[in-house]
Image (cartoon, coloured by chain):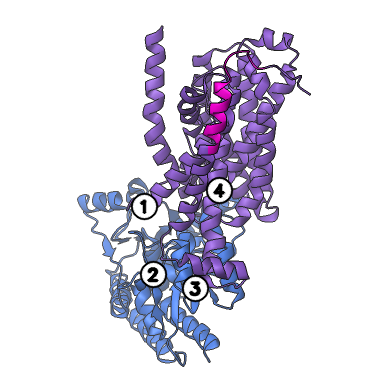
Amino acid sequence: MRASRRLGAAAGLAAAFAAFPVSAGEKPAAPGWPSRVVSLNLCADELVLRLADRAQVAAVTAFARDSRGSTVAAEAAGVPVTRGLAEEIVALKPDLVVAGAFTTRTTVGLLKRIGVPPLELGVPADFDGVRAQIRQVAAAVGHPERGEAMVAELDATLAHVVPAARSLRVLVLRPNAFTVSPGTLGDAIIRAAGLVNVAAAIGRDRTGSVPLEAAALADADLVVVDASETGTPSLADALLHHPILERLRGQGRMVAIPNRLWTCPGPQIAELVARLAAAARERAP
Amino acid sequence: MTPPMTPPVTRMTPQTRSRRLVAGLGLLVGLLTLASVAVGYAALDLPAALGDAWAGRPTLPALVLMELRLPRALLGALVGFSLGLTGAVMQGYLRNPLADPGILGVSSAAALGAVMVFHGGLAGSLALALPLGGIAGAALAALGIVVLAARGTGTQGLILAGIGLSSLAGALTALVLNLAPNPYAALEIVFWLMGSLADRSLDHVRLCLPLMAIGWVLMLSTARALDALALGEDIAASLGFDLVSVRLRIVTGAALAVGSGVAVSGAIGFVGLVVPHLVRPLVGARPTPSLWPSGLLGAALVLGADLLVRLVPTRPELKLGVVTALVGAPFLIALLVRRGDGR
């Protein structure tokens, strides 16, 4: 599996060189816009792959290809990947580097020193922040109109969301029992779906993880867990199959939603709002 | 089986003391188990939860009590008993005051076995594979130690071999976890190397209890032989003990007890080292009267450490091995220094 992945990467690299610099069938970015975009963070990957032309993208992170966490696994197939190491990035001679504000700090520091100022994406805490970030990346890669279209689509999906009859109490449990802290984008998503985030009322640790007993005693109407069954076990995932959560599942309180929808602040958050609202309508028609 | 051996014709005090100590420690373990059930992260109405659980009503408090609090307390006692007893048996058999499943690498090897089974996906298809993986790892390590001892390797040599084995098993565990395709796996080495009882379930108790119990019985069955071995292997053999059988029972027993424990709680260090040393001043140097008290004190130590990690305000909670190492590591250093002085 690893070997095939490596082969895939090699094939992708070859394809990238073959396709470069002319991209077929896509409207080229205006002259003066970046032609070698490198992204250093999964959330940056998602926006770059959606907003830039394929030929503009020199490399994304290896995470982009993992469909469990990434919403652009299909788009990332064949795109060269890096591990975000400074030497890899410099060798790619990027003219735009899109990084997360909290990841690959050493690489970002080096890029600044050698004069390739990276575009650093923060972590938006609300929908306006998401819209702004989409527009920011779209402008940086030279396709502002695609950013506007993406924002319009997001808003259209949100406008069609029908909340449940009463506002249910919801608790999100991601692997390792990480939950959604108040004041974050996840919290805004829960509110947009017409739900109340129970995590505000129970003891979270600094990393946003909750003890399972606090999670159970919170008595949430809905417990949102990861939908994907990877077949690649970890203790973090096994925790979500603890007998006490299986009992809640038996009571119809569990909702499974793919982890990748929660990972990044992109257009997928509209789908997340819609799915949460649909689950709530099912539970409280 | 083993021929009965008349106890040394001296005072009976060690035996009586041991019995009293066992009763006292048993009470302590009982109290700590109750305390462990009572302490948690969320307010739980214990009487109501107990009432619901008794009446079979699956209310949330009853579920928390039965599926989270109880397994955590039980596992603390079971794993602690296994580690304490194994430490006492190993120290007796190897005639080595530094012997401990953690220091000799048995726990790390068990963790490696459990990690290979769990992250390799075998535990998903067959639940029993998890403790069996731990037992296989522990058995190989224990066998290695015993073979080294049989070849005449001294105390220091065994400890050094154990340290080497621990490092190797730790490194291989890290390798397996890093090769595991699940992105969370690599971070989980802390659990396997330091141990934790957080959010375990009754399934874990069911998995490890029967195997552990067999291990305890095997190890306890060697008590008289251990007493005889204190006089030397030749004397023990001349007293009619089958040393091959003794060795086999100790290796199998330690592997079953430690291996199945580590498979569900990770490797918790130093318990087996410290506990027999605390017990010996009370019951004397003979192995037999120290076995049950060592097991019980081990249970008390792990239960106490597990209470502590929940009571100190660090979140995420400390791993159990951190607390036991805070107690055990200075103890080990003191033992080593004292041995050095004796030369």
C-alpha gap between disc 1 and disc 3? 29 Å
C-alpha gap between disc 3 and disc 2? 10 Å
**Mark 2 belongs to which amino acid?**
Val
Q: Which residues are magenta?
A: B7-23
**Mark 1 belongs to which amino acid?**
Leu
Label 1 secondary element:
helix
C-alpha gap between disc 2 and disc 1? 24 Å
Task: Please name the residue that numbered disc 3 is placed on.
Answer: A224
Please state the chain letter of the residue tagged with numbered disc 2 in the rendered image: A
Along the horizontal axis of the image, is B9 left or right of A31?
Answer: right
Task: Please name the residue that numbered disc 1 is placed on.
Answer: B311
**Residue at screen point 57% across, 56% down:** B201
User: Do residues under tags 3 and 2 come within 8 Å of each other at their CB atoms?
Assistant: no
C-alpha gap between disc 1 and disc 4? 18 Å
Frontmost of labels 2 and 4 is 4
| Foreground residue among A39 and B216 | B216
The hue in which chain A appears in the rendered picture of the protein: blue
Task: Please name the residue that numbered disc 2 is placed on.
Answer: A180
Please state the chain letter of the residue tagged with numbered disc 4 in the rendered image: B
